[in-house]
Amino acid sequence: MNHYDPLDIDSQDKVRAVRATREQLADQADIDDVRWLMSSKRGRRILWRTLERGEVFKLSFNTNSMSMAFAEGRKNEGLRTLALIHTASPDLYATMMKESRE
């Protein structure tokens, strides 16, 4: 049984610290995974296709608001991937762009 005491600040701080550590480890795992993918031509192709499917480089305007909302959601995930690429392997991003044109 969970006994939550709103006045126990020390326990709350410990819980926050554990959560922060878990989030930091998860973020680092994401960066390591993208770095691993970017290290090979095949991985760069996979990530480039992910960016294209997310339509990161296109406008998502549509007169139908639900279609536009769906496109924005897809684009948001693509932009998240792009941000991970720039964090993990910014030097290989240009290589990936060049390879996508070949």
Image: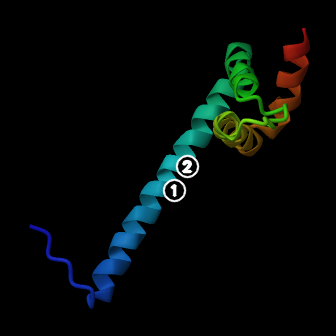
Between the C-alphas of marks 2 and 1, the distance is 5 Å
83 over 43 or under it: above or below: below
Tell me residue 51's x, y (percent): 73, 28
The residue pinned by badge 1 equals 24
What is the quadrant of the C terminus in the image?
top right
Specify the color scheme.
rainbow
Q: Quadrant of residue 89?
A: top right
Q: Verify CB contact (< 8 Å) between mark 2 and mark 1.
A: yes
Assess disc 1: are there few (<14), some (14-19) or many (≥20) residues with their C-alpha within 10 Å of its C-alpha: few
Q: Secondary structure at mark 2?
A: helix
Q: Nearer the viewer, residue 62 or 41?
A: 62
The residue pinned by badge 2 equals 27
Tell me residue 30's x, y (percent): 56, 40
- Number of numbered callouts drawn: 2
Q: Quadrant of residue 4?
A: bottom left
Tell me residue 61's x, y (percent): 81, 37
For badge 1, the amino acid type reads: Gln
Residue sticking out furthest to the front? 64
Q: Residue at x 42, y 56 (%)?
A: 22
Tell me residue 57's x, y (percent): 84, 32
5 over 40 or under it: above or below: below
34 over 97 or under it: above or below: below
Q: Secondary structure at mark 1?
A: helix
Residue sticking out furthest to the bottom? 7
Residue sticking out furthest to the top? 102
Q: Nearer the viewer, residue 90 or 57?
A: 57
Q: Residue at x 81, y 39 (%)?
A: 90
Q: Residue at x 33, y 79 (%)?
A: 12
Q: Which mark, residue 4?
A: none
Q: Nearer the viewer, residue 42 or 77?
A: 77
